[in-house]
Amino acid sequence: MNKKVRVARLSILSNSILIILKVIVGMFSGSVSILSEAIHSFMDLLASIVAFFSVRISDTPADERHPYGHGKYENISGVIEALLIFVAAFWIIYEAVKKIVVPPKVEHIGYGFAVMVVSAIVNIFISRRLYQVARETDSVALEADALHLKTDVYTSFGVATGLLLMWISGMHLFDPIIAIFVALLILKESYSLFLKAYAPLLDLALPAADVTLITTIIGRHCTGEMSFHDLRTRKAGNYRYIDFHLNLDPDKTVREAHKICDQIEEDLKKAFDHTEVTIHVENF
């Protein structure tokens, strides 16, 4: 089992345990902010399941039906996760507004506070691990999952703060207000995640810094009157695709042209993991 699949499975396990704890304490205490966090964690669980299957599929080698591989499954996973968060946020706002109209009586605040703090601490460790593996493998699906849990850390601490304020002041209105604040943070998260995951589905170019580095690497090999043009880049999952036209002296032999292309391709692959390079050789 590869590293991406193992860490995705860990995320599923932690989310499942936290959902059970939050639902039990939320129902026991009557706190809408705790229940909103349970809904958030449920969406995190769905996102973790989507991420788990997407990273398994995305690493499948290219085949006859998918000659460019399966990398975009990770981007599709990210889009789905963003939409799930979006739905969860509006559900939380809806429930919170109802509680503002008819304020709930929240009991056993200490249990709720403890569960929120435990949830935040667990997700700090899990999200850090997800981010680490996401950076190592350039996985947008795992990065999306890590972003879910990172937001859950903030919202859990937010709910814990609201419960503490309720305990100090006796004002139960803090509960739905904190729930709405949680939902707004979730909406911001879903928007950022959607943009990041959706962009590669449109075959947008790689970031400007990457394109600059690619241009520099190719330029190092362009000696004399050699030049290149029509550089195109895109990304699918953790795979980068680079293609361009290379102008060579017509006196170059096929062997010499092939050697130059191999050197350029080797340097590009050293700079970027999981990269496919296509070079169109032309005479100037």
Image (cartoon, rainbow, N blue to C red):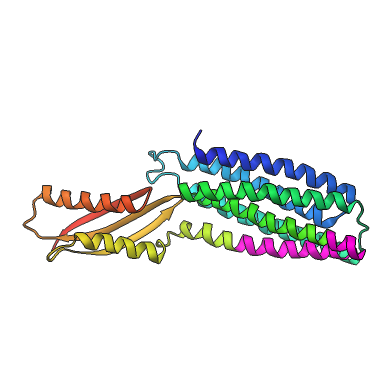
The answer to whether residue 126 is left or right of residue 251 is: right
Q: Is residue 113 above or below residue 14?
A: below
Q: Which of 255 and 21 is in front in this view?
A: 21
Q: Which residue is drawn at 45% across and 41% down?
A: 59
Please tell me which residue lies in front, 237 or 124.
124
Left or right, 93 with respect to 85, comes to right
Q: Where is residue 99 in the image (x, y as percent from the top left)?
A: 87, 62
In the rendered image of this protein, does residue 115 appear above or below residue 197? above
Instruction: Residue at 63% x, 47% y: name it.
Output: 125
Query: Residue 172's spot in the image, x, y percent?
Result: 90, 63
The reply to whether the magenta stretch includes residue 40 is no
Instruction: Read off the magenta span.
Output: 164-191
Work out whether 241 lies above or below 207: above
Please provide percent x and percent y for residue 183: 73, 62
Residue 102 position within the rendered picture, expressed as x and y whole percent measured from the top left: 92, 63
Tell me if residue 168 is in the magenta stretch. yes
Count of marks overlaid on the render: 0
Furthest residue in direction top, as rendered: 1
Which is nearer the eye, 126 or 232?
Answer: 126
| Quadrant position of residue 208 | bottom left
Residue 161, quarter of the rendered image = bottom right
Name the magenta segment's main secondary structure: helix
The residue drawn where x is 35% and y is 63% is 211
Look at the picture and state if 10 lies above or below 154: above
